Structure formats: structure tokens, C-alpha cells
Image (spheres, rainbow, N blue to C red):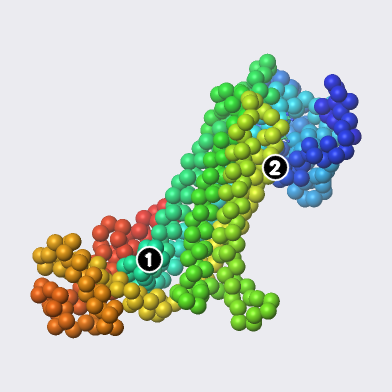
Amino acid sequence: MAKMWAGRTSGETDILADSFNSSIGFDQRLFRQDITGSIAHAAMLAKQGIITCDEANSIINALNGILQDIESGALAIDQKAEDIHMFVEQILTQRIGETGKKLHTARSRNDQVALDLRLYLRDYSDDLTTLLKDLIGALIGKAESNLDVIMPGYTHLQHAQPVLFSHHILAYAMMLERDVQRIADCRRRINVSPIGCCALAGTTFDTDRLFEARKLGFDSVCLNSLDGVSDRDFCVELLSALSLIMTHLSRLSEELILWSSQEFSFIELSDDFTTGSSIMPQKKNPDMAELCRGKTGRVYGDLMALLTTLKGLPLAYNKDMQEDKESVFDACDTVKICLQVFAPMIRSMKVNAGNMAESAKKGFMNATDLADYLVLKGMAFRDAYKVSGTIVAYCIQSGHILEDLSIDDYKKFSPLIDKDVYQAIDLGNCVQKRSSEGGTSIESVKKQIAHLREVL
Ligand code: ARG
């Protein structure tokens, strides 16, 4: 079929070149944004007297009809079309004839595609924020229903100090809270209108860019037309925020996978969010968490692909930029599905408080508290550290834990130690005493929950 841009050339391209050039396979999802943008454009053209009101009405009615027909399935998007912009314009002209051809006055596909993408990502950012908040809510719920459950806190994956499970899981809620902020910040720069930049240099027509931008809900317009059509910073920013979300989900996934192993048995994921094995009848695999961890690499890849596509491009639009959409949409879809799966997986997960508490007894996690105890009795911390370490070494050698060492044994290491040492090293007390701002005490955890609730 001859192209709408036939003129200088015949508009006949090789079949292979045609399909190579076409982006309809992946930009058809922009049909709503494309039509919404065109409706605002027609209204602006009429307001400025560039087309008549009758012409604008006829264009707008037809565009609404096209939207309805695509949504209802009455109009199938032609997979042989060059892209969604050409498809919509073609159908418009088929339906209303000559008037349809006036829509593309004072715009170009270059500002049009930038507009569509910004409109799409603006909505996406809002959806994503809802999903992030839902997951934060799920984490808060788990923290609240397991508020005083003690688990081992780790550094180097070695038992370090006892912490509350609620404290641990809220660390992820904090990461996601920052993600919400990042998306909001990114959205501000998405919400700037490129329409009216035209092909690259603006237009000779007396357009009203601000009117069109306001109609579409934008905060402002891009002030340099070359920048307006070639800027994909907002995509890079979003993909980098999405990559960080995936980093957070991946780290949490890793913990869920570890915790549901036989060795830990800290949690049990519900049957709905695990799978079995085709050969081993006893298996219950944390596939959803593994997939989230695995898909993280894909989203990073999308970000790298986009950055690499952009790095060598001279101003203004280059066809390379058509490659932005597959990376952007893939990252958007991937993060969305991961968040959708994650929230119910967290909500339905069972916490094995007993196993966590049992594990917390091992590894001398109260050794720091023993040292702190000696400090309170007047010893310098460095000396107290050494005494506590020596006692731990003695316990390992003699098969004791700090809790069951006799007071006579303790006295051999320091005369400062008294019966109140047992209270000082009780794991429950170790946690409760960490009441510093942001510490692992119940009071601190409650404060964190209150803060997060406010964000929601
Ligand atoms: N399908 C194109 C894209 O996604 C639309 C813009 C085409 N512009 C052009 N000058 N050929 O980038």
C-alpha cells in the first residue's frame, strides 16, 4: 500500500523493509493516548482559527468513534500499518474524507509520539504508585500481626543481633516508600507537554501550546522544540526508578526464598504462590519470588538498552528512538506484574515465629548486650568487648550459651558481673532496649508503622 508520506518517493517500500520499519506491533497500546492527543489538537486548531469549528467537531466525533470501535473490538488495529499514529489518521480520513487530512496541521509524528508516551507513562506512574502502596500495606499488615516476633538479625549472613521480624520486614516498606517518592518526582518531569514542537523546529502556524497542554492535563510545555522531540530522559528516569524497585523486590525475594528453605523454615509461602515439581512429590518451590528475582535482570537490561540507544543520537528525532518503546513497555509490564504478585504473596505467607525464636537463641547474638552491660558497670567499651568475647569463646569450648553460664563462672571473667546480667542478656530485653530512634524495639517499630500509614 502507498504510504501517507508518498510524494517525494513513491511510498512503495519493500515488504521486508515495511515490516522492519513498522512499530504497530508494540505501539498499538498507545491508541487511547494517541486519540486523546488528537482530540486536544483538533480543539486547539479550531480555537486558533486554523481549522473551522465544524471541521474540528467532525474530526473529534470521528476520533471518539474510532476510540469506541477499537475498545469494543469493532475496529481491529491493522498489523500492517506503519504505526499507531498513521493507523488512526488513516481510519479518520477513511471515515470523514478531506477534513480528516487537516488534523495533522501544525504537528508531526515526532511530537505526537513523545506526547503519547508521556500520557501513557503518566497513567502508568499513577497505577504503579497504587501497587507500591498496596505492597507497603501488605508489609505493614505482616509486621502488625507479628509485632513481637524475635528473629536473628544478620550481617554477612551470620547471626549478629536479635531483631524483631516486624522491624526487618518494615525495612522493605521503607525502600518502597522511597520508590513512591521517586515515581512522584519522575512524574513531574513526565508531565511536560512536547506537542507543538512539531517535527523539530516549531511551526509557522499561530498555535496555542499551553491551551493544548492544559486540555491534556500537563503542568507545562517543553520550552525548546529540538529538546521536546528528542528528550527521552523521562523514560530513562522511570526505568531507573523501576530498576531500583526491582532491586528491592529481588532482595526481599532472596530472603523469602532463604527463609522458606528447610534450613531456615522461618516462613511458609501459601500454596497459591508456590509450585510443585514434576518429579519430586514433596516439593514446594518459591517460584514467584524466584521469578521476581530473575526478572530484575530484565528490567536492568531494558534500562541499559534505552541508555545505549540514546547515547549517540544527534538532535533531533532519529528513528533509533522508535526502539525506546519496547524497552519501556517491557520494564513497565514486568514491574507491574511483579508488584501484583508480591502483595498477595506477602499477605498469605505464614510466619513461623517459633522457628525464628529458636534460631535466635544460637550464635551468641546477645554478646554485644553483655559488653554493654559491663560498660554500664563502669568498664570502657573496648575492654568490655574483650571480656564478652572471651566469655563467648569459653562458652563455645564448654558447650554453654550465655544464658546458662553460672554466676560463679561469670565472676571468673569480671567481678563486675552480677545476677542482673541474666536480665541484660535476655533476648526479649535485648530487643526492647534498642529503643534508639529507628532501632528494633516495639516502640520504634510502632512509630515506623505510624509513619508509613501516613504515607499511604
Ligand atoms: N513510530 C515512530 C516512533 O515510534 C513514530 C515517529 C516517526 N517519526 C518519523 N519522523 N518517522 O518513533
Q: Position of residue 49 (x, y in %)?
A: 70, 19
Q: Position of residue 350 (x, y in %)?
A: 48, 74
Task: State left or right for residue 179 relative to residue 364.
Answer: right
Q: Which residue is mark 2?
A: 30
Look at the numbered disc 1 and give the secondary structure of its residue.
strand
Q: Earlier in the sequence, mark 2 or mark 1?
A: 2
Q: Type of residue at label 2?
A: Leu
Identify the residue at horizontal 61%, vertical 48% (top origin): 301
Q: Is residue 144 above or below residue 396?
A: above
Identify the residue at horizontal 74%, vertical 30% (top origin): 57
Check mark 2 vs ligand 1: CB closer than 8 Å? yes or no: no
Task: State left or right for residue 135 relative to residue 297.
Answer: left
Task: State left or right for residue 109 relative to residue 16.
Answer: left
| Residue 382 vs residue 263, the one in the foreground | 382
Binning the other alpha carbons within 10 Å of mark 2 as few (below 14), some (14 to 19) or many (20 upward) gives: some
Q: Type of residue at label 1?
A: Tyr
Q: Position of residue 412 (x, y in %)?
A: 13, 78
Q: Which residue is mark 1?
A: 154
Quadrant position of residue 380 = bottom left
Give the quadrant of the N terminus. top right
Q: Position of residue 275 (x, y in %)?
A: 62, 73
Give the alpha-carbon distance from disc 2 to disc 1, as whole Å.
47 Å
Q: Is residue 245 above or below residue 13?
A: below
